[in-house]
Image (spheres, rainbow, N blue to C red):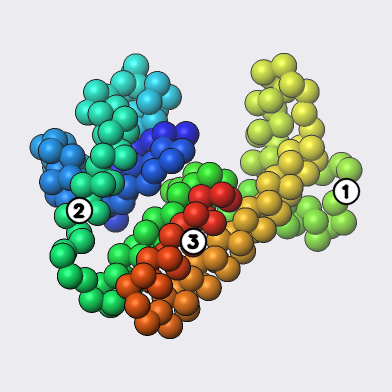
Amino acid sequence: MANLQLHPDGWVYIRTDNEVYVDTPENLALDSGIANPFELLTELTYIPNEKYRRDKKIFNPPYWEIGNSYISNVATIVTAKMTRELPLELTLSEEIQIQTSAINGAAYAARGRYITHGKSTTYAAQNAEVQKWISAGEPSIVSDVDDPRAAQRAAIKTVKGVPTTTVEVLSEWKAIITLWITKDMEIVEIVESAKIDLNLASTLEDAKMIGAAAVAALNLL
């Protein structure tokens, strides 16, 4: 799902199915030719026609013309970034840094296909309820008091016309957590393996090939 985010770490992330751009607002202005619209902002999330939030303010309808321009032109922006960052003569160390940055960006995007960044507290609470249920032997009947988040989700789904029990929610979360752990391990393996190979690279072409292969593998997850 195409989206744009100004993360609290001060970096801008533009993601589409085919491209990922990661850089500072100042460099995005250079790469896009659009004046920096993020000044005085701490956080921004934009998903076209779905979500538009600037710090704590939510906009409806969720439409942002500048955000749409960034997303639709992300390929051109990525090319501009590469042109800006690549001098005529690169050292091997500089090429390794560039490839490492590309790999980290692809890993971030890969994780974003399975989790929503910034919801670690929610995920931790859900996981705690699932682990407690598993430790108890995955009983078919549980107390809503012991599993308030699962009970809340079950109640919401039931009200919306999808009768659901708390145990069914816990089972659903267990499957999701298992999938996420598996995918995260795959991501870590690709990233760490590539970084080791990059440190052993002896030529610029080797470093480029290692980085491209790792990014391609991460994009398939």
Residue toward you, 112 or 163: 112
Q: Name the residue under label 3.
A: 213
Mark 2, secondary structure of its residue: helix
Percent position of residue 15, x then y: 39, 41
Q: Which of marks 2 and 1 is in front?
A: 2
Q: Do the residues labelled 3 and 1 touch (CB within 8 Å)?
A: no
Quarter where residue 63 is shown: top left
The residue that appears at 89% across and 43% down in the rendered structure is 140
| Label 1: few (<14), some (14–19) or many (≥20) C-alpha neighbours in 10 Å | few
Count the numbered circles shown. Answer: 3
Q: Mark 2 points at which residue?
A: 83
Residue type at mark 1: give it: Pro
Q: In this view, does 54 lie above or below 209?
A: above
Percent position of residue 156, x then y: 65, 26
Which label sits on residue 121? none
Residue 24 can be seen, yes or no = no
Q: In this view, does 124 lie above or below 3?
A: below
